[in-house]
């Protein structure tokens, strides 16, 4: 049960969909191997990374984490996820953060740091490059894949 | 209720001091926001202000005071359930200084991810974006529409709030919030008289917000209990009316006395708002109603419609906003106008001034451009065409004979870090 969706996803990743030319690293969403989560929808990722959904589907408190990517990579992530520019995402968080309502996802300096956060925290859900994940975490969504829902 | 001013900084330092060794620096976060703006008004007959707390505003000399502001925020985190926040903002104040004010100083507790309780100095979210009005980077315009945001510039309280969020299946989220507290040192200049000081007045309310896909809908209610109201000599007016009521045995004048005084008054704020953001399109509609049981602050309806369309880094937008105060006329004065007494005549004249001074009926049609020129920095230009049929507290002294028409041109730079 645990492995089949992962295998399906791995197969999905190997047969990586055609990427935009010059689009940069291939982005995936990963979770802790003990999170009880085997796949997530784009809708869930969108809601978790915008601070609207507070829990993973398994019931654990969600802790979204991003790597401090160059603006171009983050721009592409949010473009794919919510069809918004980075400036709009920054404005969105400025409203919530400076009113003390919510905080944006944690940002870690490197892929290794993102992995550390995810392996330490069962509720962590992170944005990573496909080639930088490890067996300690589980890939649950190919951000660049075709809309699955 | 001054506890927030020193308690929260100590808590933030205390929380930071307890940070686990493996994650240094993440427990304490310094952030900030600001706006540098210049506003120019086509007329010298009335000074354009951003809200009723500003003691003077923009005329034909470009004015940097109306929109410029800077804020610093420190956030401390102990663990996933306890946080503390301190925010200080410097802007052009009611006393014509830039004296920094502690806007937020609260301790937040999340017993569950869906529940947040906050205590200390917190923002009053009485309508959409009410508590983020100083953060220019967070919205499209150069300033929130004055017709909706300018009349009652009450932004913060010492008190508590409780927020709960629930996932209503699929992507729809419901957020409910209740709040109660005492307003913090907010004063409204009254031209030629001492300021109206609302500090310590009680405020309570509730919000319901639905977020689903590109839509965000929200209803809010807030109730303000005014304790002191206007200072003398305006407050003396009620005393004189009371005396005349006794003297003339006219209970109608008693009612006028109570209506003229703001002391003991109840102001009720009802607000409904809707935003839409899908792809390059960004729309917002808000309708507010101020209910009042006092002649000195007339009931009003206000609202705005805003639409922007993003073209890469540039977002042109249009905005229409309007406020209409209840035209209440002169309250009952019985036989006072015909009394051969100079004091009675003075009272009659003063009642007429108090009853109409805060009547605001005006609309603004604006067009602007937001240009996200750098990461976390934007430049905006906006042109407002304002028609004030009844310029009240939104203008800093409109001269008699002013047509009520003005064009205001504004350029701002907003940033966050």
Image (cartoon, grey):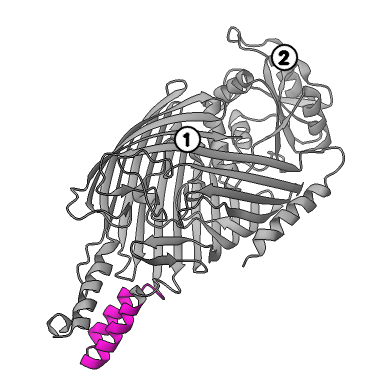
Question: Residue B157's x, y, as percent?
Answer: 55, 61
Name the chain under label 1. Answer: B
Q: Few, some or many C-alpha atoms within 10 Å of disc 2 (few <14, some 14-19, many ≥20)?
A: few
Q: Helix or strand or loop: what does disc 1 sit on?
A: loop
At a point 82% along the width and 48% down the height, the residue shown is B17
Does residue B299 appear to the left or right of B168 in the view shown? left
Residue B244 drawn in magenta: yes
Q: Is residue B332 visible?
A: no
Quadrant position of the N terminus of chain A in the picture: top right
- Where residue B240 sits, quadrant-wise, is bottom left
Question: Residue A93's x, y, as percent?
Answer: 57, 37
Mark seen at residue A11: 2
Quadrant position of the C terminus of chain A in the picture: top right
Question: Residue A118's x, y, as percent?
Answer: 79, 32
Mark seen at residue B214: 1
Reply above or below: B104 against B158. above
At a point 49% along the width and 69% down the height, the residue shown is B201
- Where residue B261 sits, quadrant-wise, is bottom left
Same subunit, labels 2 and 1: the answer reads no
- State the extent of the magenta-drawn residues as a range: B236-264
Mark seen at residue B45: none
Nearer-the-camera pick, B22 or B209? B22
Q: Mark 2 or mark 1: which is in front?
A: 1
CA separation, marks 2 and 1?
A: 32 Å
Question: Residue B367's x, y, as percent?
Answer: 32, 33
């Amino acid at each position: 049960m645990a492995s089949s969706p992962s295998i399906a996803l791995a197969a999905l990743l190997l047969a990586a969909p055609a990427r935009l030319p010059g689009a940069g690293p291939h982005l995936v969403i990963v979770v802790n191997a003990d999170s009880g989560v085997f796949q997530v929808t784009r809708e869930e990722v969108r809601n978790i990374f915008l601070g609207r959904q507070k829990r993973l589907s398994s019931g654990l408190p969600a802790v979204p984490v991003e790597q401090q990517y160059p603006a171009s990579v983050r721009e592409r992530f949010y473009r794919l996820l919510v069809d918004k520019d980075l400036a709009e995402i920054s404005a969105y968080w400025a409203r919530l953060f400076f009113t003390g309502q919510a905080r944006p996802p944690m940002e870690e300096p490197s892929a290794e740091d993102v992995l550390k956060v995810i392996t330490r925290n069962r509720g962590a859900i992170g944005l990573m490059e496909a080639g930088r994940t490890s067996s300690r975490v589980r890939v649950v969504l190919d951000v660049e894949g075709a809309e699955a829902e | 209720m001054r506890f927030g001013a020193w308690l929260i900084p100590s808590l933030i330092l205390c929380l930071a001091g307890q940070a686990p060794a493996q994650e240094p620096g993440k427990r304490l976060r310094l952030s900030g926001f600001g706006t540098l703006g210049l506003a120019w008004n086509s007329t010298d007959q009335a000074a354009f202000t951003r809200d009723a707390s500003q003691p003077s505003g923009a005329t034909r000399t470009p004015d940097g005071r109306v929109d410029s502001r800077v804020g610093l925020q420190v956030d401390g985190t102990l663990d996933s359930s306890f946080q503390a926040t301190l925010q200080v903002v410097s802007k052009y104040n009611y006393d014509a200084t830039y004296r920094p004010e502690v806007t937020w100083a609260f301790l937040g507790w999340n017993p569950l991810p869906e529940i947040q309780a906050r205590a200390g100095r917190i923002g009053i979210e009485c309508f959409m974006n009410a508590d983020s009005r100083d953060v220019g980077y967070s919205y499209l315009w150069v300033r929130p529409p004055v017709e909706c945001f300018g009349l009652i510039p009450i932004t913060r309280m010492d008190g508590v709030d409780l927020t709960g969020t629930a996932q209503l299946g699929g992507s729809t989220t419901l957020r409910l919030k209740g709040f109660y507290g005492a307003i913090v040192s907010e004063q409204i200049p009254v031209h030629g008289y001492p300021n109206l000081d609302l500090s310590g007045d009680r405020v309570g309310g509730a919000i319901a917000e639905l977020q689903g896909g590109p839509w965000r809908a929200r209803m809010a209610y807030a109730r303000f209990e005014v304790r002191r109201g206007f200072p003398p000599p305006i407050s003396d007016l009620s005393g004189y009316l009371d005396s005349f009521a006794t003297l003339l045995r006219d209970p109608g004048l008693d009612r006028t006395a109570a209506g003229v005084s703001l002391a003991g008054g109840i102001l009720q704020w009802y607000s409904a708002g809707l935003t839409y953001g899908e792809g390059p399109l960004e729309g917002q509609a808000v309708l507010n109603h101020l209910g009042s049981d006092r002649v000195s602050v007339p009931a009003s309806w206000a609202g705005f419609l805003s639409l922007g369309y993003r073209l890469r880094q540039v977002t042109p937008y249009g905005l229409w906003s309007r406020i209409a105060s209840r035209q209440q006329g002169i309250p009952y004065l019985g036989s006072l106008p015909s009394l051969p007494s100079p004091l009675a005549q003075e009272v009659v004249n003063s009642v007429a001034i108090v009853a109409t001074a805060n009547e605001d009926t005006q609309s603004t049609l604006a067009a602007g451009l937001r240009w996200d020129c750098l990461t976390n920095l934007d430049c905006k230009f906006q042109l407002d065409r304002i028609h004030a049929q009844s310029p009240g507290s939104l203008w800093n002294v409109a001269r008699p004979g002013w047509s009520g028409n003005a064009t205001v041109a504004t350029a701002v730079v907003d940033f966050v870090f």
